Image (cartoon, rainbow, N blue to C red):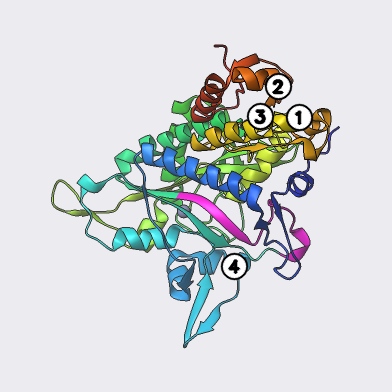
Amino acid sequence: MRDLDHRRLGRELGLFDTDPLMGAGLPYWLPDGAVVRHTLEEYVREAERAAGYRHVYSPVLGKRELYELSGHWDHYRDDMYPPMDVGGEQMLLRPSLCPHHALIFRSRTRSHRDLPFRMAELGGMYRSERSGVLGGLTRVRAIQLNDAHIFCTPDQAVEEAAGALGLISRAYADLGVRAARHRLSLPGGGGKYVADPALWRRATALLREVLEASGVPYEAVEGEAAFYGPKIDVQITDPAGRESTLSTVQIDFHQPERFGLRYTGPDGARHRPVMVHRSVIGSVERAVAHLLEEHGGAFPPWLAPLQLVVLPVGEEQEEHAHAVVREAVALGLRAEVSGRAEGSLGSRIRRSRLVPYQAVLGAREAEDGMLAVRLRDGRRPGVLPVAEFLRRVEGRVRARGTALWEPA
Ligand SMILES: [Zn+2]
């Protein structure tokens, strides 16, 4: 079996690394990795914007009292960094974004006409994992989370949660990610869950309704809920068959209570909203780790750090190759020349094996304004005019998804 470990692929492709002086579980992103991450983050923001979300930014620190109010301090303290004393106050690196978003919602008077309020943020959160379990991008101490909280009326909660599931399945199609199964995660024994049986029952019933309506098969599993409520987990498997959670959807009655959230109803009275927590791609770190392993480093064309390589056969075609690359870059594509100085044509093609589009430029092609096109999967669509080839690559990149080429 090919070694599909994302740590090896990430090093080999120059995407990310760690340094003992920065610390274990704190990877940094190299330029090619940063391109993948940036493209993924922009994709998520765009998909959310189109689905009616509004983006916010909130700080990665908060006062200890904030997490006492949210319940994290009582139920989640073992996974949090110890408090820092700052000017007589205790500050914490946040273990989640929910408390900040609840405060942002609370900061203004809200009317039923403002709901659903879909508040999204790609933000940092922190987890004090033990150093023994850290590795690559899947167990990290600093996490960039694709998070959102939908503040809505109780009547809107099922539709909003179902909308989030829809957003997740569209993203999986664009990214070439397969959901292994859907899990309804319920509380188990032990004291790590907030006690309010009526609210748990209500939230669980609504999530079952969402799953039944979506038609996806699911299993209910005890002991996997968040401390404040049940959730739908979209599970993925790695090449070794190990399962983990990538995306989640939760219906939460607890945090709105804790934070005393209100909106004014059509009756003029004050009502309690529901919070739907959801993440489409989970953390950016886990998503990139999974994409690397799922595709063996051959990212879908729209995500590939380098999308097009132009290969001049001889030195006489180098200038022409640079002109093609300039044209591609002007169209928004990520393109480079791999010239004669980098070795024989055969070895340059082999080195470009993960680049979706490879265009060979010989004397004939240069003279005619053509390119001999090869795809990463071995297909050869033929010799095409430069403009037509670039237009088709641009079309594939814009369309997203995993397909490399469409018949003309
Ligand atoms: Zn949340």
Asked if disc 3 is less than 8 Å from ligand 1, the answer is no
Crowd rating for badge 4 (residues with CA inside 10 Å; few <14, some 14–19, many 20+):
many
Q: Residues within 10 Å of mark 3 (few under 14, many from 20)?
A: many
Picture quadrant of residue 238: top right
Q: Amino acid at mark 4?
A: Met
x, y percent for residue 218: 57, 31
| Contact? badges 1 and 4 (CB < 8 Å) | no
In this view, the residue in front, 130 or 24, is: 24
Determine the residue positioned at 30% across, 61% down. 106
Find disc 3 in the rendering and name its residue: 356
Under circle 1, the secondary element is: loop
Q: Give the magenta part as a residue range.
A: 130-147
State the mark number for residue 314: 1
Q: Earlier in the sequence, mark 2 or mark 1?
A: 1
Earlier along the polypeptide chain: callout 4 or callout 3? 4
Foreground tag (2 vs 3): 2
Q: Nearer the viewer's eye, disc 3 or disc 1?
A: 1
Residue 363 is tagged as: 2
Mark 4 or 3, which is nearer the eye? Answer: 3
Kind of residue at disc 3: Pro
Say whether residue 45 is left or right of residue 309.
Answer: left
Residue beneath label 4, please? 80
- What is the C-alpha distance between the residues marked 2 and 4? 62 Å
How far across and down, in percent of the image, does residue 171 sit? 52, 34
